[in-house]
Amino acid sequence: MRWRPAVLLPFLLAACAKSDAPSSGKTVVRFLAGPDVGGGAKEVIAEFHQLHPELLIEMVEGPAGTGTREDMYSTSFMGGESTYDIVYMDVVWMPKFAHQGWLRPLDDKFTPEMQAQFLPGDIAGSRYEGKTYRVPVQSDGGLLYYRKDLLEAAGIAPPNTWAELAAAAKKLQNPPEVWGFVFQGKQYEGLVCDFLELVWGNGGTLIDEHGGVHVDDPAAVEALTWLVDAVRKDKISPDGVLTFQEEEARHMFQEGRAVFMRNWPYAWNLAQQDGSPVKGKVGIRPMVHGSGRSPAATLGGWGYGISSFSKNPEAAWTFIEFASSREAQKVAYMKSGIIPTRKALFDDPDIVSKSPHYKELREVLETAKPRPVHPQWARVSDILQVHLSAALSGQKTPEAALKAAADEIRPAMAR
Ligand code: GLC
């Protein structure tokens, strides 16, 4: 069950309290987002308010867990509410939201000429059944971060394969002070993203293009076995990793307490900022893969759509146009490390000089693979999350967990 009233209530109350507030005669445009790590979104909104004093953008900073925010949007739309004008969406929510009729098509506003200025993967992730429902503002792909200094001092080359990572981690870790490998191990969407990279990186797939379910294929079982072993057998990951989302992993890595980390590109700028204990000591590379295979990254990313229930769609568009501009995306990168979606920013001199890792990053992003584009993805992901978690916590073997997941996913896909 995804509905968690105790978690949602404070955020819903905050949103309601705000909706009574404007006495200034301004048109209010509201959206729900995650915590604004680094402050980039607030700065973009402040700049927008300077240009458009007649509009008031209310960003509700919701919980970090993406599934919880998806539930909050869904609940509001199911009730036909106009609480949110803009829908700040993960790439995987869009097919479901569009399928339900909760989003306005944006094709008359976000023209093909405009779309051509964005990375193709981000545009593909914004279209459903021939229409565009999202303007992408954040590109994302999973990466392996490593402590360059520790590896160099030990004469160890950065790992390509799972086995190489585990061997290096065992050698360099010193638990509980310094752990070998941290990732997103909590029961939520992030865990599925991490798992998919291991499955793809082992030559497997979870769901093929015809809807065939391969969740319990040997390639997937091997991938999960490696991850479970990292926690339970090799002990290169702390038990606490089962509660980690992106930020918990980043904090541990940034504090100098992990040798390797799987995370999204946003963690780079934060690790490099002044005062960071690992500043200048971090390298990135594609995620490790199975022996004899190639690396893979899960394509992530965020963008803005307009709710079908919004009473202020024009004002919402005015903000979306600004927030997806070159200037705004540059602010979001400089402050929060949010990877742009506009191609031109990958050659921007200020960004490139701040980002020696940009070349590798662009390569990872251009080859990142989307999760299955399906209106039932949220359900499929929920099922996977439960069973992956049961394996990580030792309640089930990887094989039994994936068999159970496959048995539930097959009928869910057919719905
Ligand atoms: C990042 C990705 C998003 C993914 C989420 C999982 O925010 O951009 O696509 O679903 O992480 O935690």
Image (cartoon, rainbow, N blue to C red):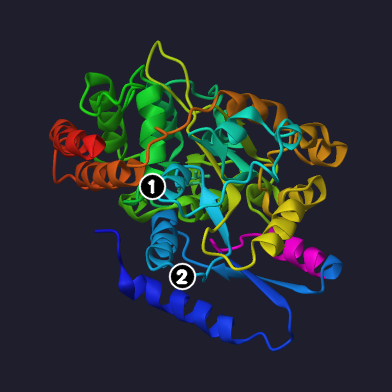
Cα–Cα span, label 2 and label 1 = 26 Å
Q: Magenta segment range?
A: 32-49
Q: Is residue 105 visible?
A: yes
> Does dot 1 land on a helix, a strand or a loop?
helix
Q: Secondary structure at mark 2?
A: loop
- Asked which quadrant contains residue 3, the reply is bottom left
- Could you say where residue 245 lies in the image, as x and y percent from the top left? 43, 53
Q: Using the image as rendered, state which of residue 221 and residue 27 is in the foreground.
A: 27
Badge 1 residue CB within 8 Å of ligand 1:
yes
Q: Residue at x 69, y 42 (%)?
A: 110
Q: Which residue in the rendered view is the most extreme toward the top?
A: 292
Residue placed under numbered mark 2 in the picture: 81
Q: Residues within 10 Å of mark 2 (few under 14, many from 20)?
A: some
Please tell me how crowded label 1 is: few (under 14), some (14-19), or many (20+) other residues with Cα within 10 Å.
many
Q: Is residue 352 left or right of residue 240?
A: right
Residue 100 x %, y %: 40, 50
Relative height, residue 79 to residue 387 (above, below): below
- Residue 268 among magenta residues: no
Q: Which mark is residue 83?
A: none
The location of residue 190, given as percent across then percent down, is: 41, 46
Left or right side of 412 for 345? right
Most distant residue in the bottom direction: 23
Which residue type carries mark 1? Glu
Quadrant location of residue 166?
A: top left
Q: Residue at x 23, y 48 (%)?
A: 386
Q: Against 395, is 150 above or below?
A: above
The magenta stretch spans residue 41: yes
Residue tagged 1? 189
Amino acid type, mark 2: Glu
- Determine if residue 148 is in view: no
Across and down, in percent, residue 223 comes to 30, 27
